[in-house]
Amino acid sequence: MIPRYARAEMTSIWSPEEKFRIWFEIEAHAADAQAELGIIPKEAAQKVWEKGRGAVFDVDRIDAIEREVKHDVIAFLTHLSEIVGPEARFVHQGMTSSDVLDTCLSVQLTRAADILIADTDLLLAALKTRAFEFKHSVTIGRSHGIHAEPTTFGLKLAGFYAEFARARARLCAAREEIRVCAISGAVGTFANIDPRVEAHVATRMDLKIEPVSTQVIPRDRHAAFFATLGVVAASIERLAVEIRHLQRTEVLEAEEYFSEGQKGSSAMPHKRNPVLTENLTGLARMVRAYVTPALENVALWHERDISHSSVERYIGPDATITLDFALVRAASVIEKLRVYPERMRQNLENTRGLVHSQRVLLALTQAGVSREAAYRLVQRNAMRAWNGEGSLLDLLIADKEVTAALPAAAISQLFDLDYHLKHVDTIFARVFAS
């Protein structure tokens, strides 16, 4: 994570201070449960809360202890004993480090998911607003980057809205899957800790119980979480690439907002570059890059090894912080996007009616011409239109083989743009019905 691509709310989840606060809460709730079960004195559990609830955990002190003991959880517990006093000996009874580490990571990822879901809502709101704004703004649809048939800019945005609605559902599912607690001891058998302690901590931390934890929460859960982030990032890149293409000088159907005083190039004063969406493309690559290590973390040795730990120290903060920044930036890009319907119409008309070729093809087949012959007739005239010899309509009307099957008036009726847009309302109803 670098500050350039980080927002404070998400970053705070991964701060050492917040991590140690969560560790304390896990330990303190476990102590409460053990006190209720008569395993430790109730006075000890009360003292842990009394001394620790308002304490400021000294990160430098914990780091100094860790440099000596070479163990982060032991360093924290040592510092906690300095704060709590003799009663701290009852903390961490029957627990292993992963009980704290994994439960804490679940809390952090769940809170991160809450922010990402809220971010997605921002993007969805922006896409919906702009989709309805340009619902009937005709533009050319492209396949292989080449003019295909007419669509509307609103439909383009409606498609992205549907995609990010799916992204939101996936984030909700990923949040639910990662929202688990494990307080089960050295190899997950509860040999030295009662399962009721785990249940109590889970309730207090708003988590579910992991049914079978070995020493750790199974990493398929984490892999699914980061894979979801990767898919969301891929959707962001698709949106960014669309805008980048539309902003090309030769196209210029839409462009990023260019603020007063903004500079596009150190050398060329005229430049207005799609820097935000290019940035989104790069950020999406980074988020997706964390999916593979998350998948490789699934296969740990036996009940647990530590190969996953260093990976998660990177990808937990970096993937969530980066995606948070990207989603908010994407929402802002859509909110401020400059759209040029007149240019869309000009671009659509540049190919001299070629966008209606399929409709002519179908009309010829319905008039009794074989599909192969109809395709040959339309393509022959379409290639002439491509070469600048006239409009497709004029060339077709001048082609006696074509008019032998279809009169000129019937051909002219096939070049109606509204024909292509008659189901726009139907599609919008599907997307925005809820």
Image (cartoon, rainbow, N blue to C red):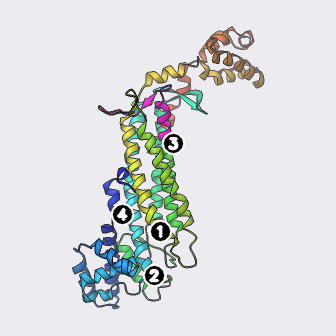
User: Circles 4 and 3: CB distance less than 8 Å?
Assistant: no
258 falls in the magenta region: yes
Residue type pointed to by label 2: Ser
Residue type pointed to by label 1: Ser
In the rendered structure, which disc, 1 or 2, sits on the residue that comes first in sequence? Answer: 2
Classify 14 as above or below 55. above
Q: Nearer the viewer's eye, disc 4 or disc 3?
A: 4
Q: CA distance from mark 2 to mark 4?
A: 25 Å
Q: CA distance from mark 4 to mark 3?
A: 29 Å
User: Circles 1 and 3: CB distance less than 8 Å?
Assistant: no
User: Circles 1 and 2: CB distance less than 8 Å?
Assistant: no
Q: What residue sits 75% from the left and 21% below the top?
A: 376
Q: Which residue is mark 4?
A: 14
Q: What residue sits 41% from the left and 87% below the top?
A: 94
For label 2, count other residues whose C-alpha is less than 10 Å away and answer few (under 14), some (14-19) or many (20+).
many
- Indicate the position of residue 2 as horizontal and vertical percent values: 38, 54
In the rendered structure, which disc, 2 or 4, sits on the residue that comes first in sequence? Answer: 4
343 falls in the magenta region: no
Mark 3 falls on what kind of element? helix
Residue 238: numbered disc: 3
The answer to whether one can see residue 42 in this image is no
Q: CA distance from mark 4 to mark 1?
A: 15 Å
Classify 67 as above or below 239. below
Classify 343 as above or below 30. above
- Indicate the position of residue 246 as horizontal and vertical percent values: 48, 31
Q: Which residues are magenta?
A: 240-259
Mark 4 falls on what kind of element? loop
Classify 52 as above or below 255. below
Q: Which residue is mark 2?
A: 184
